[in-house]
Image (cartoon, rainbow, N blue to C red):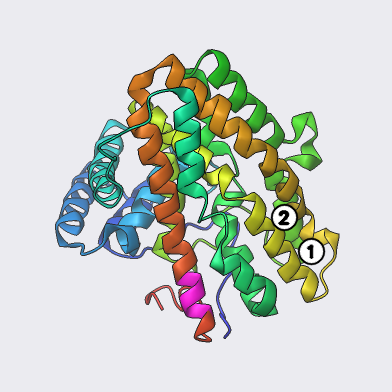
Amino acid sequence: MTTQWTDQLTGTAPSPRGPASDTLIRIITGRSETADVELSSLADNVSTALRATEDLLSDDDLQLTLFLLYVLHYGPAEYVEGDWEWNPRLIGIRQLIEGQLENVLRLHNPVPAVLPVTGEEVAETLFSMTADAARPSLATWMARHATVEQLREFLIHRSIYTLREADPHTWVIPRLRGRAKAALVEIQSDEYGGGKPDCIHAEIFARTLRNFGLDDRPDAYIDVVPAVILNSMNTMSFFGLNRRLQGATIGHLAAFEMTSSIPNKYYSRAFARLGYDEDVTWYFDEHVEADAVHEQIAGRDLAGGAAEDDPRLIADIVFGASACLFVDDLVGKRLYDRWTNGETALRTSPEHEG
């Protein structure tokens, strides 16, 4: 189970996965001499793809297109030429994809008829929702059975989000106040190393990649990860960049933290079983302790505090948590199904999603 193409040259744009992403890449890399015409073509290609797709969440072309539209708000992306971040036509095209993404996520994660009412009830609902997911089959399987090549793939998959860890959720900080805002800042301060650059969680993960012989540049492996990995990051960005969905961002972060501590313990064991020391396992060991604390802050002070401050957020808090569990389950299922069948979970070529 090997993948022969993985590394991307610095400043090189990702390989397109269909007409929409191909057109967008030409636009943002400055390779188009007629941007207005290309923008119209992009809108047409996205509309056509949205009508034709059978599953947006695993659609390579649309997920890469949305990912690149979001990258304009993050960086680094050395291949981008020009100021496209707030181009109104690109924002409008992004909203076309976001509209269908929200429809799909809400279809799979309907809000229950009976919702919690108080902040304490919101926290208890979230802990109940995440109880089973906190005992993950993928992580426990990896602790016993994962090969070196599968651990390598695991790090590649994780790199797409983890080299920007915490960034999607940080967008919601200026939209909160009081107890909820203080709770989120406390969590994010830990994620960003508490003022110590070497302790930023994204930097610790970058060290893990280097010590495993992998590229630590953001998006170095964008060409080989499947659409469900892009969708996981896209869902976070979608929630975080849209103020009306601040409740969903809160719920997503709470569920994310509540389902992190135990899996990371097993991930660490998987690497240790194959002889890797703390140079590789530090990232996972750090999250066993940190996220055990974060889950309480996220559930009770962030989600509970936000619900108390504005009860209108409760439905979306529950929705965001459910969406987090659903999207992450798609990722876990792909990895587990492929690996237990002796197959790669990465895409096998730029032209074919294997």
Q: Please give left or right for residue 91 compared with residue 71 in the image.
A: left
**Magenta stretch containing residue 143, yes or no?**
no
Question: Alpha-carbon neighbours of circle 2 within 10 Å: few (<14), some, or many (≥20)?
Answer: many
Examine the residues drawn in magenta and state their main secondary structure: helix
SS at badge 1: helix
Q: Position of residue 183 (x, y in %)?
A: 60, 24
Question: Label 1, label 2: how many angstroms apart (C-alpha)?
Answer: 14 Å
- Looking at numbered disc 2 in the image, what kind of residue is underneath it? Phe
Q: Note whether 200 is above or below 222 in the view shown.
A: above
Identify residue for label 1.
211
Quarter of the image for residue 3 reads bottom right
SS at badge 2: helix
Magenta-colored span = 334-339
**Which residue is located at x 61 percent, y 50 percent?**
260
Q: Position of residue 225 (x, y in %)?
A: 48, 66
**Which residue is located at x 56 percent, y 54 percent?**
134
Which of 284/42 is in front?
Answer: 284
Quarter of the image for residue 197 reads top right
The tally of labels here is 2
Which of 141/351 is in front?
Answer: 141
**Magenta stretch containing residue 335, yes or no?**
yes
Q: Position of residue 223 (x, y in %)?
A: 48, 65
**Viewport quadrant of the C terminus:** bottom left
